[in-house]
Image (cartoon, helix red, strand yellow):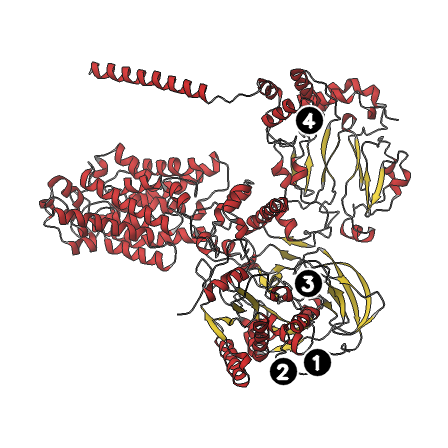
C-alpha cells in the first residue's frame, strides 16, 4: 500500500520532460547580481564595499536577525555596485553586483568530489557549519536550515522527513540529484538526523520516479554497509498526488500525523527538509562549501528536446543569461516561470537574478496558461474535493469578496497553504486562490495584531 | 514573443470546464434519449426538440434582454435542463405544455435566482412538478404512442407504480423485472430503461463528473425502506426491486439529485441528502396520494441543502 | 359552509389579537434604553453608511457624536458642513467648518505616457496585482488600473477611463468619504482640498524612483528635479524621495510650478481657460456654477466663500 496524504489533492499531468537530461554546469557570465534576500526572514546586510575583491565562497552578506542567513559570493571578482535592483517580480531588493574575474575560491573550501562519510560528532560544529555556509531550505520557502535544526525548548523531533516528492509537474532538478548524488543526499540526511537526536529518517519519493527510489535505496544500503551511523534511514514510496511535497501533506503521508492549525511540524515531532537542502547540508558540513550553487531545470512543452536542461548554476546568474545560454525564449512561450507551474512565480523581469531557491526556468504556452473568463460558481465542490487542507475555497472566495474577516477566520482561511489546487480544479475558472491569498494575508495580520496585543 | 504574461500561481488549469461537465451530462443522457425515441418515436423527438430549444432560447433571451449580461447558453446547462425536462414528461404531452414547463424551469426556477449556480431548486423538476400540479390529467396520460420498435400497446396505460397505487399488489403481478431493466412499460421517457440510465451513471462516474454518494444512498435507502415494509407485509407493500426499477428513482437519483447546484457539497452531506430523498420518495409511494414521489422528494431535500452544507463541512486538516 | 368561514375568521382574528399582545409585551420587556437624540442625529445624516467618518455607519456616527458631546473629532465627509450644522443644531453644539475635500488620482500614467512592459493575466484586482508584483508597466508606484477604487466608491464617483486606463473622479459626485483612498494599494489617491470652484494644483505622480528611472518608466513622471519647489513663492512644495508634494493648505494656486515642471507632472484643474480672474468676484456666482447640481456639493460651495484660498492673487 503506497502512502499519500489523506485530504484532497489533484493530479496534473506529470510532464517530467527533462528527466533524462544529466546535470550540466552552466558557464559563468561576466557579471552576477547577488540578492541580499534569498531566504525567508530579514534580508542580509552587505559586508563588502564597492571596489572590494571577493573570492568565490566568501561571505558578502551577514544575517540581520534571528531568522536570516549568510550570503556568499558565488564567483570571484570585483564588487561593482551595491544597491536596489528589481527582483523577478519587479520589487526593489538590495543586490551586490560582482564583475567576474577568474574562478578563485576562498580558503578552507573542499572542492574535490571525494565522498566524505565520517559524520562529525559535535552537533554544535555541524549547526555552525550549516549556518556559516548559508544553507536554507530549497523546497520553496527558503527557511534558514540552522533555525529549523535547532530544536525548540521541550520539543523533540521523532521523525525527519526528506522531501523527494517533487510533486510539481515539469521540475526534475531534485530527481536528477537523487540519481546523480544519492550518497551525498543520504549523508546529509544522516547529519541532520544526528543533530535532531537520532530520529527516524524517511526519504519520501513519489512512485513516478522509480529510478530515483532505486538510486537512493542503493545508496542507503551502500552507506549502511560502511557505517552504523546510517541505520534508521529508509525510503517511503508515495503515491503520486499534488501537493505531496507540501510540508503538512508530507507529514500526513509519511507519519500519518496532522499539524494543528497555525502549528509547526515540530509540534507533532516532525522535521521536513528537501533533498536538495540535504545535499547543501552535506556540502556545508563535510566540504565546508557554502551554498553558492544549486540545480535548476530549464523546460517546457514548447522547448525543443535538445534544449531541455538541468543546470548546475552559480547563484546570482541572471535569468536572461540562462535563457540566452539555452538558445533564447522558445517559439510559443508566453510565460516564463521560476519554480513549478502550480506554485512558482511568473517572471516579469528577465534581468532578475537567480537566488538560492531558484529551481527552474519553465516556459508555458498561451494554451496552457492563459486564464479563461470567470463564470458563475456551479457549486460542484471540485475545489472542496481538491483542497488538501479540507477548506472550502468557494466559500472563502465569497466571504473574501465581501470582506467578511471574522467568517473567513472561522472557516480557517489562515490554514491555506496556497498550493493552487482550488484554482486549478475550478471548472468555472473562478480565480479562487488570487482572492483567497490576499484575504489570507489580511486575516493573518489581524491574528498577529491580536496576539501582539495580549 | 512581445511581452511576458504575468499572473499569480497556479499557472496551469484543468481541462474540465463548466461546459465540459454539462456536455458530459448530456452525453450520459444519450442512451436514455435513444431508448425513449425508439419506444415513443416522433412524438418524443418533438418533445425533446421543443424542450431543449425553448430552454436554451429562453435563457438566451432572458440574459440578453432582461438581465443584460453576457449570455450563458454556451455552458450547456440550459440544454441539460431541456433534456431532463423532456425525459420527465409523458410522450403524449402537447407542445404548449412542454413550452410552459420550459418557461417555469428556466424562467422561474433558474433565472429569477440569478442563473446557473444560484438556484435553490432543480429547474427541470420545478418545471415538471408545476406541470404535474397544473395539468394532472395530461401529465399522467401514458399513451398510446407509436414508437419505432415494440408495439404500441406495450406503451399504453398506466405506469407500474400507477397500477400498484390503484390496483394494489395484484395489479403488478404480471410484470417481469427483466423487462423493466431493459425497457420498462409505460411511464415518461426517462422511466423506460434502467440499463440506459445505468450506462449514463457509469459514464458520469468514470468521467468524474459526479461522486456516487448521493445516488447510492438513495438506492440503498429505497431498498432498505421498502425491504422492511415488504417483509412486514408482502401483500400490502411492493417489493424493493420493483421500487428501485420503477418510476423516476433511477433517472432522479443519477441525473437530478446529483445536480451540483442543488445538492450538498460534502460527501457526508450527500449521504444525508440521499437518505432523505429515499425516505420521502417511499413515504409518498406507500402512503401518499401520488403514485410517484421522486420529484417531490428531490425538491423537498433541495430546500434543506443550505442547512446540510452548513452543518456537514468537510474534514479539515489538523482540526 | 358558513359556519366554517365564520369560525376561520374568528380564530384568525383571535390569534392575531393574542400575538399582538404578546409582541407588545415582549417589545416592552426587552426595550433597549437609548438616548433619543441618537435617533434625531441619525435623521439628519445622509444615511449612506459609507464609513467615511471612521464609524461603522451613520447610526454609529450619531452615537459617537452624542457620546462625545462635541463635534471636534466627528465629521461627516459626505454631508459636509451643512449636515454638521444640522447635527450641531440637534445637539446644541458648536461646529467648526471644514474645507470641502475631493479625491484626487495622482497618476498620469496613461497608455502613451507609461508603456506596458508585460501583461497581467490574473484576477483583475489592484490588491491581488499589487501583492503579486510591481505591475505591468515600468513604474512600480503608479496606478495599477484594475479599478479597486471604482468598486469601493459607493457614490459612483469614480470611473475608469478606457482611453487612459486610469480612474477619473467626478468631483460633483465625490463626497470625500475616503473609501477609494483605503482601497488603493498603491496610495495613488489622496483627499485634497477641493479648492475654490474646484480649482486646485497637485502633483499627479507618486513615483519615488530616481529621475532617470522614473522618466524611463513614464514620460509624465515627477523626476524630483525640485524646480517647482524653488519657484513656489509660498513654500508649499517639498521634494522628498525624488517626489514633489504640494501642501494644499499652503498652496495659493499661483500655478508658477505648473509652468516650471519639465514633465508636466503638476496638474492644475478647473482653472478658466483664460487668465484666472479674482475668485472673490466669481464666488457669489458660484451657486449657478456646475457644482451646485448636487445639493451637498452646493452646500460645500457655500462654505467655500469663507475660505482663505478664495483670496487669489
Q: Quick one: label 1 or label 2, which is nearer the N terminus?
A: 1
- At 70% from the left edge and 27% from the top edge, which residue is drawn? C73
Instruction: Return the chain for callout 4.
Output: C
Q: Are marks 1 and 2 in contact (CB under 8 Å)?
A: yes
In whole angstroms, how far apart are the C-alphas of marks 1 and 2?
11 Å
Q: In terms of secondary structure, where does tag 3 sit? A: loop
* Quadrant (top left/top right/bottom left/bottom right) for the N terminus of chain C: top left
Q: Is residue C277 above or below residue A268?
A: above
**Callout 2: 10 Å neighbours few (<14), some, many (20+)?**
some
Q: Are marks 2 and 4 in contact (CB under 8 Å)?
A: no
Q: What residue is pinned by disc 3?
A: A38
Q: What residue is pinned by disc 4?
A: C75
Q: In terms of secondary structure, where does tag 1 sit? A: loop
Q: Quick one: label 1 or label 3, which is nearer the N terminus?
A: 3
**Are labels 1 and 2 assigned to the same chain?**
yes
Residue A116 is labelled as 2
Residue A110 is labelled as 1
Q: Where, by quadrant of the figure, is residue A282 drawn?
A: bottom right
Instruction: Return the chain for callout 1.
Output: A
Q: Position of residue B124 (x, y in %)?
A: 33, 42
Q: Is residue B136 above or below residue C89?
A: below
Q: Is residue B228 rendered to the left or right of residue B309?
A: left
Q: Quick one: label 2 or label 3, which is nearer the N terminus?
A: 3
Q: Position of residue B53 (x, y in %)?
A: 37, 43
Amino acid at each position: 500500500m503506497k502512502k499519500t496524504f489523506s485530504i484532497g489533492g489533484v493530479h496534473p499531468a506529470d510532464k517530467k520532460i527533462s528527466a533524462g537530461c544529466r546535470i550540466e554546469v552552466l558557464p559563468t557570465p561576466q557579471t552576477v547580481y547577488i540578492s541580499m534576500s534569498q531566504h525567508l526572514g530579514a534580508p542580509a546586510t552587505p559586508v563588502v564595499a564597492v571596489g572590494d575583491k571577493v573570492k568565490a565562497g566568501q561571505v558578502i552578506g551577514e544575517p540581520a536577525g534571528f531568522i536570516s542567513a549568510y550570503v556568499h559570493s558565488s564567483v570571484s571578482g570585483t564588487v561593482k555596485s551595491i544597491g536596489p535592483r528589481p527582483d523577478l517580480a519587479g520589487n526593489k531588493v538590495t543586490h551586490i553586483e560582482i564583475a567576474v574575474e577568474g574562478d578563485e575560491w576562498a580558503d578552507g573550501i573542499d572542492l574535490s568530489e571525494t565522498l566524505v562519510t565520517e559524520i562529525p560528532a559535535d552537533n554544535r560544529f555541524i549547526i555552525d557549519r550549516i549556518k556559516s555556509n548559508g544553507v536554507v531550505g530549497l523546497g520553496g520557502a527558503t527557511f534558514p536550515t540552522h533555525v529549523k535544526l535547532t530544536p525548540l525548548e521541550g520539543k523533540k523531533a521523532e521523525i525527519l522527513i526528506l522531501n523527494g516528492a517533487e510533486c510539481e509537474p515539469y521540475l526534475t532538478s531534485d530527481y536528477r540529484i537523487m540519481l546523480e548524488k544519492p550518497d551525498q543526499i543520504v549523508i546529509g540526511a544522516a547529519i541532520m538526523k544526528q543533530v535532531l537526536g537520532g530520529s527516524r529518517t524517511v526519504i519520501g519519493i513519489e512512485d513516478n520516479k522509480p529510478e530515483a527510489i532505486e538510486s537512493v535505496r542503493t545508496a542507503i544500503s551502500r552507506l549502511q554497509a560502511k557505517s552504523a551511523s546510517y541505520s534508521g534511514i529508509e525510503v517511503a514510496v508515495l503515491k503520486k498526488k499534488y501537493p505531496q511535497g507540501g510540508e503538512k501533506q508530507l507529514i500526513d503521508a509519511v507519519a500519518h500525523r496532522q499539524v494543528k492549525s497555525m502549528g509547526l511540524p515540530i509540534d507533532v515531532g516532525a522535521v521536513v527538509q528537501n533533498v536538495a537542502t540535504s545535499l547543501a547540508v552535506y556540502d556545508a558540513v563535510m566540504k565546508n562549501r557554502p551554498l553558492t550553487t544549486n540545480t535548476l531545470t530549464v523546460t517546457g512543452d514548447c522547448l525543443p528536446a535538445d534544449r531541455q536542461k538541468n543546470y548546475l548554476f552559480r547563484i546570482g546568474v541572471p535569468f536572461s543569461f540562462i535563457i540566452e545560454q539555452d538558445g533564447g525564449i522558445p517559439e510559443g512561450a508566453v510565460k516564463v516561470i521560476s519554480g513549478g507551474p502550480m506554485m512558482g512565480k511568473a517572471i516579469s523581469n528577465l534581468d532578475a537574478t537567480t537566488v538560492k531557491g531558484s529551481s527552474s526556468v519553465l516556459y508555458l504556452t498561451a494554451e496552457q496558461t492563459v486564464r479563461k473568463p470567470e463564470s458563475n460558481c456551479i457549486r460542484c465542490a471540485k475545489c472542496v474535493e481538491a483542497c488538501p487542507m479540507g477548506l472550502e475555497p468557494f466559500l472563502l472566495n465569497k466571504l473574501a469578496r465581501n470582506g467578511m474577516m471574522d467568517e473567513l477566520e472561522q472557516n480557517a482561511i489562515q490554514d491555506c497553504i496556497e498550493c493552487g489546487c482550488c484554482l486549478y480544479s475550478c471548472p468555472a475558472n473562478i480565480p479562487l486562490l488570487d482572492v483567497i491569498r490576499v484575504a489570507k494575508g489580511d486575516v493573518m495580520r489581524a491574528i498577529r495584531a491580536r496576539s501582539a496585543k495580549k | 514573443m512581445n511581452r511576458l504574461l504575468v499572473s499569480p500561481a497556479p499557472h496551469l488549469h484543468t481541462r474540465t470546464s463548466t461546459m465540459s461537465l454539462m456536455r458530459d451530462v448530456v452525453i450520459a443522457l444519450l442512451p436514455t434519449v435513444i431508448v425513449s425515441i425508439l419506444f415513443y418515436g416522433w412524438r418524443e423527438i418533438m418533445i425533446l426538440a421543443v424542450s431543449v430549444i425553448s430552454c436554451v432560447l429562453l435563457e438566451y433571451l432572458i440574459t440578453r434582454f432582461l438581465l443584460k449580461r453576457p449570455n450563458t447558453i454556451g455552458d450547456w446547462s440550459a440544454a441539460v435542463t431541456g433534456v431532463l425536462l423532456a425525459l420527465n414528461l409523458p410522450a403524449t404531452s402537447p407542445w404548449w405544455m412542454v413550452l410552459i414547463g420550459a418557461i417555469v424551469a428556466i424562467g422561474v426556477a433558474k433565472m429569477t435566482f440569478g442563473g446557473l449556480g444560484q438556484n435553490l431548486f432543480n429547474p427541470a423538476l420545478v418545471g415538471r412538478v408545476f406541470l404535474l400540479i397544473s395539468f394532472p390529467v395530461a401529465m399522467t396520460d401514458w399513451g398510446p404512442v407509436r414508437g419505432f420498435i415494440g408495439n404500441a400497446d406495450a406503451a399504453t396505460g398506466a405506469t407500474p407504480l400507477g397500477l400498484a397505487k390503484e390496483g394494489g399488489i395484484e395489479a403488478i403481478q404480471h410484470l417481469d423485472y427483466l423487462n423493466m431493466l431493459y425497457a420498462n412499460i409505460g411511464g415518461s421517457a426517462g422511466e423506460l430503461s434502467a440499463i440506459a440510465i445505468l450506462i449514463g451513471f457509469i459514464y458520469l462516474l468514470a468521467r468524474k463528473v459526479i461522486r456516487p454518494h448521493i445516488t447510492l444512498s438513495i438506492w440503498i435507502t429505497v431498498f432498505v425502506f421498502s425491504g422492511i415494509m415488504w417483509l412486514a407485509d408482502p401483500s400490502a407493500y411492493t417489493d424493493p426491486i420493483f421500487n428501485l426499477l420503477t418510476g423516476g428513482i433511477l433517472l432522479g437519483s443519477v441525473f437530478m439529485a446529483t445536480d451540483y447546484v442543488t445538492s450538498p457539497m460534502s460527501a457526508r452531506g450527500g449521504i444525508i441528502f440521499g437518505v432523505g430523498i429515499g425516505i420521502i420518495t417511499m413515504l409518498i409511494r406507500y402512503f401518499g396520494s401520488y403514485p410517484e414521489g421522486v420529484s417531490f422528494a428531490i425538491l423537498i431535500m433541495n430546500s434543506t441543502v443550505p442547512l446540510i452544507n452548513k452543518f456537514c463541512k468537510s474534514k479539515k486538516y489538523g482540526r | 359552509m358558513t359556519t366554517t368561514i365564520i369560525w376561520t375568521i374568528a380564530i384568525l382574528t383571535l390569534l392575531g389579537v393574542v400575538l399582538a399582545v404578546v409582541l407588545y409585551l415582549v417589545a416592552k420587556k426587552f426595550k433597549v434604553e437609548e438616548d433619543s437624540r441618537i435617533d434625531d442625529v441619525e435623521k439628519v445624516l445622509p444615511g449612506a453608511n459609507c464609513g467615511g467618518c471612521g464609524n461603522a455607519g451613520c447610526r454609529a456616527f450619531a452615537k459617537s457624536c452624542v457620546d462625545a458631546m462635541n463635534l471636534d473629532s466627528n465629521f461627516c465627509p459626505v454631508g459636509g458642513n451643512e449636515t454638521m450644522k444640522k447635527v450641531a443644531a440637534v445637539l446644541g453644539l458648536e461646529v467648526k467648518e471644514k474645507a470641502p475635500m475631493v479625491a484626487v488620482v495622482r497618476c498620469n500614467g496613461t497608455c502613451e505616457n507609461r508603456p506596458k512592459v508585460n501583461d497581467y493575466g490574473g484576477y483583475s484586482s489592484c490588491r491581488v496585482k499589487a501583492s503579486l508584483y510591481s505591475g505591468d508597466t515600468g513604474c512600480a508606484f503608479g496606478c495599477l488600473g484594475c479599478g479597486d477604487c471604482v468598486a469601493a466608491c459607493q457614490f459612483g464617483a469614480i470611473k475608469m477611463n478606457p482611453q487612459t486606463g486610469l480612474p477619473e473622479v467626478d468631483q460633483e459626485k465625490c463626497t470625500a468619504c475616503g473609501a477609494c483612498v483605503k482601497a488603493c494599494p498603491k496610495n495613488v489617491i489622496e483627499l485634497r482640498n477641493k479648492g475654490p470652484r474646484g480649482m486646485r494644483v497637485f502633483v499627479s505622480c507618486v513615483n519615488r524612483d530616481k529621475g532617470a528611472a522614473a522618466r524611463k518608466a513614464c514620460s509624465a513622471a515627477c523626476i524630483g528635479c525640485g524646480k517647482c519647489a524653488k519657484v513656489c513663492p509660498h513654500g508649499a512644495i517639498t521634494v522628498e524621495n525624488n517626489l514633489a508634494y504640494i501642501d494644499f493648505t499652503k498652496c495659493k494656486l499661483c500655478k508658477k510650478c505648473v509652468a516650471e515642471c519639465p514633465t508636466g507632472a503638476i496638474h492644475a484643474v478647473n482653472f478658466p481657460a483664460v487668465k484666472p480672474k479674482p475668485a472673490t468676484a466669481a464666488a457669489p456666482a458660484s451657486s449657478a456654477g456646475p457644482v451646485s447640481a448636487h445639493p451637498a456639493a452646493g452646500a460645500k460651495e457655500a462654505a467655500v466663500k469663507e475660505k482663505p484660498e478664495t483670496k487669489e492673487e
